[in-house]
Amino acid sequence: MTQDVKINRGLKGIYFERSGVSHIDGAKGELLYRGYTIHDLAEHATFEEVCYLLIHGDLPTAAQLSAFDDQLRAARQLPLAIYDIIRACQGGHPMDVLRTAVSALAALEPDSQDASEEGFLRNGLRLTAQVPMIIAAHEAIRNGRDPVPADPDLSHAANWLWMLKGEKPSLEAARLADVDFILHAEHGANASSFAARVTVGTEANLHGAMVTALSTLAGPAHGGAAEDVMKMVAEIGRPDNAAAYVKAKRAAREPVTGFGHRVYRAEDPRARHMRDGVRKLGEEMGAPQWYEILQAVVEAMKPYARHGLNVNVDFYSGVIYQLHGIPMDLYVPIFAIGRMPGWLVQCLEQRRSNILIRPLTLYNGPDPRAYVPISDRKSAP
């Protein structure tokens, strides 16, 4: 019964929709948000500006940015019941707690079921503000501390570090977190964004789509690279051990974490901005050895660059989090903080020209056969 059709496993190379949000050229190592290069945005914009750009299509004026930022800061509130839910499952993995809390918000927020364009925008902005609050509250509660209230005077990134650590971050640390969020804000039809679009395709509400996205991001093949890099760095221990580590990995035909990407054949264009951040933050915090280990691995991997094994953005992210003293199981939730506007705009695009996403699988099971009564069935030999 099989047909002569081409199977594109993982939908690799398949275009399923048009999108005006991000452009990725994997061969050249280019990434654009709404036509703006990621380099210009990482060097000059704020995360709030990038959120506005992704959602509305253009960079904001000063007045537009101020109004948008005011909305984002005003949304830094959680129903009290969310804190009870976090306490009830405080021993769980932070991604499980985050997903559970976002799902609960669908039942607690008064307009969560509004699947209109305005409802998506309103709920998306609120969730963008709430997700870092949930993560920080869980980190406090599981360590026997009271959650740190949001500070309306801080930027999105600075407020995240404030709620997480209970101390105001330096301008440099806040800016690096800001850049981290910008670099992770949007990346086309990645697994979590595609999954969110599948959910919206059923005409579900935004909270449902975000729960889908979070569930997908939690898988180690999608969101776990930064955590794995930090484990690798700890295993290497010293810069002069890097070459032998890489040689052993390659000899065993095992991947070196942080190298290679499903899309990029050249270096991930986001990586350079995190590389500079690791170097500067390491120097600021008196721990330059982490950067030195990373660069020693990069040097050892140079012979394999021609095979497309170039460094990706997550290669550097984990060390930045380590320098902040952030537990490794928070690395993927931090990814989610940055990706919120990307998920929102992907959901908006899906909603605007909605169609149920229903690909096919090619049947390769048994040929048609007759039903056998249970009394006549025999066990297979």
Image (cartoon, grey):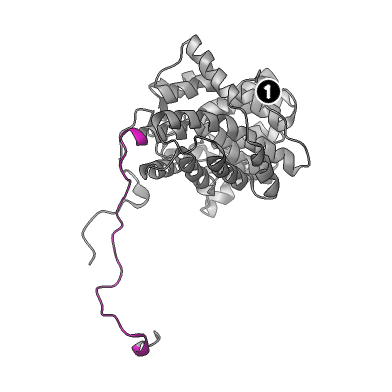
The residue closer to the viewer here, 370 or 106, is 106
On the image, the x and y values in percent for residue 298 come to 56, 36
100 in the magenta segment? no
Please state, as top left, top right, bottom left or bottom right, where the C terminus lies in the image.
Answer: bottom left
**266 relative to 363, above or below:** above
In the image, the segment drawn in magenta is 351-376
| Image position, residue 74 (x, y; %) | 59, 23
Majority secondary structure in the magenta region: loop
Q: Is residue 214 above or below residue 363?
A: above
Q: Position of residue 124 (x, y in %)?
A: 49, 31
Q: Is residue 247 above or below residue 5?
A: above
The N terminus - image quarter: bottom left
Query: Going by the image, does 151 lie left or right of 210?
Result: right
Which residue bears the numbered disc 1? 151
Residue 236 in sight here: no
Residue shown at 70%/24% (left/top)?
283
Could you tell me which residue is drawn at 62 percent across and 30 percent down? 77
- In the image, what residue type sits under mark 1? Asp
Query: In the rendered image, which quarter is residue 323 located in?
Result: top right
